[in-house]
Amino acid sequence: MTFVNTELFPALKDLAVSERPGDRRRVVRDVFQDAYNYMKSGQLMRQVVNKITGIDFNDLKEKQHFGEIYEQILNDLQSAGNAGEYYTPRAITAFMADRIDPRPGELLLDPACGTGGFLSCAIRQMRQRYVTSVEDEDRMQHGLRAVEKKQLPHMLCVTNMLLHGIHDPSFVRHDNTLARPYISYGAADRVDIVLTNPPFGGREEDGIESNFPKKFQTRETADLFLALIIRLLRPGGRAAVVLPDGTLFGEGVKTRLKEELLHECNLHTIVRLPNSVFKPYASIGTNLLFFEKGEPTSEVWFYEHRVPAGQKSYSMTRPIRVEHLQPAVDWWGGAGRQRRIETEVAWRVAIDDIKARGYNLDIKNPHVVADEHGDPEELLAKLEEAEREAARLRDQLKAILEEALLR
């Protein structure tokens, strides 16, 4: 442990690197720049090193198995305190990547990449569908962009990329995407695809909001990311973003953001998820927003994803799985979404109706009949009768107790 703490980590932090593109020493140095060893046991450290040394990373099959094990470790982190915030369930990342359908040569960005779940799904999908040559692979790898603010998930993401066969994962920057002035993002920064689950429920430190135009200034992280995503997309670019219910019904800055989104982009689909999808880390309603930049929105399709029959909610032991989202894939209506139909879980709302609602996108399923709770006056009368009966029984019990004490 003395060697690791006093020699190894300091040496890796200060690695000399060249300016040559693809110098992997830069990746190592950047990963260890803010890293510290939290393991206290030299015996455990030795055991870990021995296990990893036993893997032949030149053997494609062994490397692939290790990559799968690593992804399972990231999945397990979902229930490990704060680490869970960096992990989006695989079913969600796979579904979003599948619907966005990235291709080699397109610039794909995750501005809050966490452990790299969206990136790994996009890579896997492109290799399965479109990568047929070394040139395709190179174009795919050169089109990846990612940023992560926190040191631990940044390190996990870089490792994840290496295990997915990415030769130079230095594209994963350790930085805060929101710390750069909004206006400084120009044409050279535009991308074709944004796939992300920005942090929500958190607030940025003082001064970050001043990087944004007055109408978008807020300290709420998810709102700032949405404003930036709209700006970063090229005309014709497409995005899939996870956002909380609060973004849909919120007012003030949120209203102005939604107005901007609907004016600058075609928000064609909102998939509404149950509160339990992100358990145990979070138990709030979330939504998947799919939009394309260049044309204003004329109508928004809503799709309500429901927990499978026979299951009350998702949980650690029974999480959401890829096959649970297959009905949404079947409903999608093809590449151009031209075959969509309204069902008991799918409905559409015209832009004029959304404007009339003050850009409130928290629109409930119109095909679900609200629970009938009865006439309010009748319910109030029953409540008063129940209270009188409770008072009568209380007096009766009091009388019985007084009589018993007098004996």
Image (tube, rainbow, N blue to C red):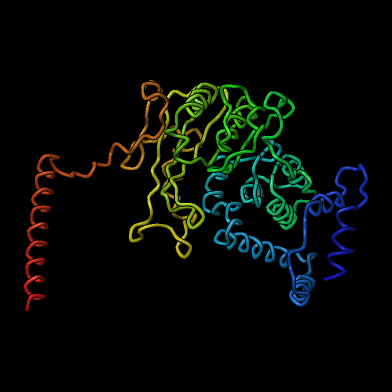
234, 359: nearer the viewer: 359
191, 204: nearer the viewer: 204
Place of residue 257 in the rendered image (x, y in percent of width and height, measured from the top left): 52, 27
For residue 210, above or below residue 48: above
- 314 sits left or right of 397 in the view: right
**Tally of numbered tags:** 0
Q: The C terminus lies in which quarter of the figure? A: bottom left
Looking at the image, the residue that sits furthest to the front is 406
- 106 sits left or right of 404 in the view: right
Place of residue 139 in the rendered image (x, y in percent of width and height, measured from the top left): 75, 41
370, 139: nearer the viewer: 370
Residue sitting at 43 percent across and 53 percent down? 276
Place of residue 160 in the rendered image (x, y in percent of width and height, measured from the top left): 70, 55
For residue 211, above or below residue 22: above
Residue sitting at 64 percent across and 49 percent down? 114
- 398 sits left or right of 253 in the view: left
73, 250: nearer the viewer: 250
Q: Quadrant of residue 239?
A: top right
For residue 65, above or below residue 251: below
Place of residue 210 in the rendered image (x, y in percent of width and height, measured from the top left): 65, 27
Residue sitting at 42 percent across and 30 percent down? 300
Q: The N terminus lies in which quarter of the figure? A: bottom right
Q: Quadrant of residue 89?
A: bottom right
Residue sitting at 49 percent across and 52 percent down? 282
